[in-house]
Amino acid sequence: MKIYFAGSIRGGRDDAVLYRQIIALLMEYGDVLTEHVGDASLTRTGEDGPSDETIYERDMAWLAEADAVIAEVTTPSHGVGYEVARAEVLGKPVLCLHRRTAGRWLSAMLAGNPALWCETYDSVEELRPILERFLHRPDLYLLKKLGRE
Amino acid sequence: MKIYFAGSIRGGRDDAVLYRQIIALLMEYGDVLTEHVGDASLTRTGEDGPSDETIYERDMAWLAEADAVIAEVTTPSHGVGYEVARAEVLGKPVLCLHRRTAGRWLSAMLAGNPALWCETYDSVEELRPILERFLHRPDLYLLKKLGRE
């Protein structure tokens, strides 16, 4: 299974350690195409090396081949919001993970969106059963979700 | 002309006054469907009243009827990133306005995206000629942009 993990880069790297922990969990279930998102040496200025155009094209290609998309959506990020929307339009199953953090409210574009699964959590320890349920059969997860509407 | 203006709400309201100024400018050119984004009484918790589902459906309906989309993309926001992607997929002309602000880098999903117009600016006074050029014929602006690729 190919997994696209989305987390904030230029929006802010406050959660970089958490992203790395989530990616380590995800690697038990499949290939994480975007493993660099959890790299502690990746700073807010973005990635040194590839141009913005190259990053955009590479990420859109990865998104197109992903079987499931998991976005950590606590730190606000244009890129993550963009990726979630493109994944949704491509018909990918999308799970949004949001921490209960003071002063952070999830956008209505995600929280009020019937095509997305949004889960709230406090610590990475709570994520295993959520990820397991989602990644076991993300297609079924998506169908079940859409069937509810 | 119907204009969809996108700015951060739950990502942070630091730029709310600026949004109001931009919206006032945009109202010289057409109807701004999302005038509430510049409302100073609208806090980070979002809008009191409508549910997230109602906000999502209303905003997607406005996006579908918009002739042009203008996003202020300095304050990171999942919602704005999401709206930009959905607008792009709908074939809407999208202008992203980004301020030169210390510690803020625009996502590669926007800056490296050939389907979007991204403009950098310092103050609202610089925006009139940019908006004028974009709103005069947003369709031509988009075609010209796509023709370059």
Image: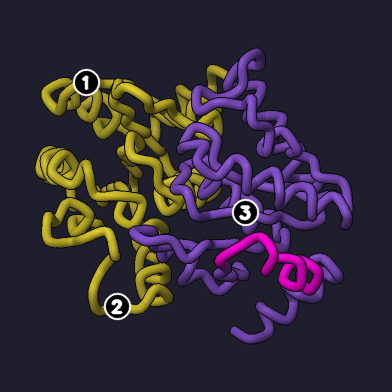
Chain colours: A yellow, B purple
Q: Which residues are magenta?
A: B122-134
Q: Is residue A136 above or below residue B52?
A: below
Q: Earlier in the sequence, mark 1 or mark 2?
A: 2
The answer for which chain carries disc 2 is: A
Q: CA distance from mark 1 to mark 3?
A: 32 Å
In percent of the image, x 53 and y 54: which residue is there?
B73
Answer whether labels 1 and 3 touch (C-beta < 8 Å): no
Q: Closer to us: mark 3 or mark 2?
A: 3
**Residue at the limit of the structure toward the top, as seen here:** B49
Relative horizontal placement of residue A24, taking residue B88 as reference (left or right): left
Q: CA distance from mark 1 to mark 2?
A: 34 Å
Is residue B50 something one can see in this rendering? yes
Q: Is residue B63 above or below residue B146?
A: above
- What amino acid type should be assigned to the residue bearing mark 2? Pro
Label 1 CA crowd tier, 10 Å (few <14, some 14–19, many 20+): few
- What amino acid type should be assigned to the residue bearing mark 3? Ala
Q: Which residue is mark 2?
A: A50
Q: SS class of the residue under badge 2?
A: loop
**Residue at the limit of the structure toward the bottom, as seen here:** B148
- Dividing the picture into quarters, in which one does residue B91 lie? bottom right
The answer for which chain carries disc 3 is: B
In percent of the image, x 10 and y 43: which residue is there?
A24
The answer for which chain carries disc 1 is: A
In percent of the image, x 65 and y 13: which residue is there?
B49
Q: Which residue is mark 3?
A: B71
Q: Which residue is mark 1?
A: A122
Q: Which corner quadrant holds the C terminus of chain B?
A: bottom right
Residue A75 locus on image (x, y percent) = 33, 39
